[in-house]
Amino acid sequence: MIDRYSRQILFPGIGKEGQRKLGNSYIVIIGCGALGTIIATTLVRAGVGKVRIVDRDFIEYHNLQRQVLFDEEDIKNQLPKAIAAERHLKKVNSSIEIEGIVADVNYTNIEKLTSGADLILDGLDNLETRFLINDVSLKHKIPWVYGGAISSYGMTMSIIPGKTPCLQCAWTNSSGHGLALTCDTAGVIGPAPFIIGSLQSVEAMKILVGTGDINRDVIIIDVWQGTFNHLEISPRVECPSCQGKFEFLEARFGTRTTSLCGQNAVQVLNPRVKGVSFKELAARLKSAGEVSYNEFILNFTVDSREIVIFPDGRAIIKNTADESLARGLYAKYIGA
Ligand SMILES: [Zn+2]
């Protein structure tokens, strides 16, 4: 094991003691797109002892341009990202524990999914879930590293509960400018998330090893312009999250729909639908349209709409951005 990590141990910031600490650490990566695949591959190779990867999505061709862990075979096998990531990474480092979980992270499950973690890493594409991570981080005193990338730019910030400002503090400081990154319209080039994911990974190493200066600013890069800037953030006295008011974590929703980043697709989540038997659902749907399934997803095509259903009852309605239409299709075919 020492040989595997010998080059990293030679680096004074890590050393033998740092390597031991990495090996005893448990991280949860939430979201396994461009940022998540970079973070996961870097920290699995670095020897973090336990790595949990949570993602709700499956892999599509337009992901391959920047999501470095996936390949065409994964798409042919219709693998969810979390499962494909786990399979590839286990071949990279069999000496650590790697666990892929296919789930939509929301207020009902985030505390369970991150329980016992030393650090949470943000590989998400939506702000709502980032605020949820922020709440869970402050409530349970788990550090987390925010990251986002879009177009040719990106930003990152480390949040250490009780020591640094949080994402809500930063949001107010900067009037939310630029933090609301979404790839719906702008597109993205690989190097932007590659660099942000790498910066998040090095912050993770510093936090886990306990050496080096943690980044307290928002770092903002633009790879096309070649710029690298720091935006200083001050703690905010009236920040609800810092005061222990966890509005995102305590939120209660009914059926929720989310337009998915850049995909012309809508995710539908009904907390009342707890789990789905693909065998029974396929039998019920086969008179209405085309159905196929494996152990991870069920595909249902009806009237040019493709619906992908996961075992937890979550569905992704493709070829539409209309959330009410998506909610209607879900109610009609899966459950109200
Ligand atoms: Zn705060």
Image (cartoon, rainbow, N blue to C red):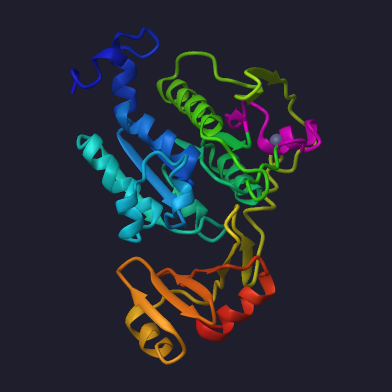
Quadrant assignment, res 79 = bottom left
Name the side, left or right, on which 58 lies relative to 240. left
Question: Is 285 one of the magenta-colored residues?
Answer: no
Q: How many marks?
A: 0
Residue 144 appears in the picture as rendered = no
Quadrant assignment, res 186 = top right
Which of 277 and 37 lies nearest the eye of the viewer? 37
Which of 254 and 126 lies nearest the eye of the viewer? 126
Range of magenta residues: 152-178
What residue sits 55% from the left and 71% below the top? 271
What residue sits 30% from the left and 8% below the top? 10
Q: Position of residue 2 (x, y in %)?
A: 19, 18
Which of 295 and 104 lies nearest the eye of the viewer? 295
Question: Is 157 one of the magenta-colored residues?
Answer: yes
Quadrant assignment, res 329 = bottom right
What residue sits 42% from the left and 39% below the top? 37
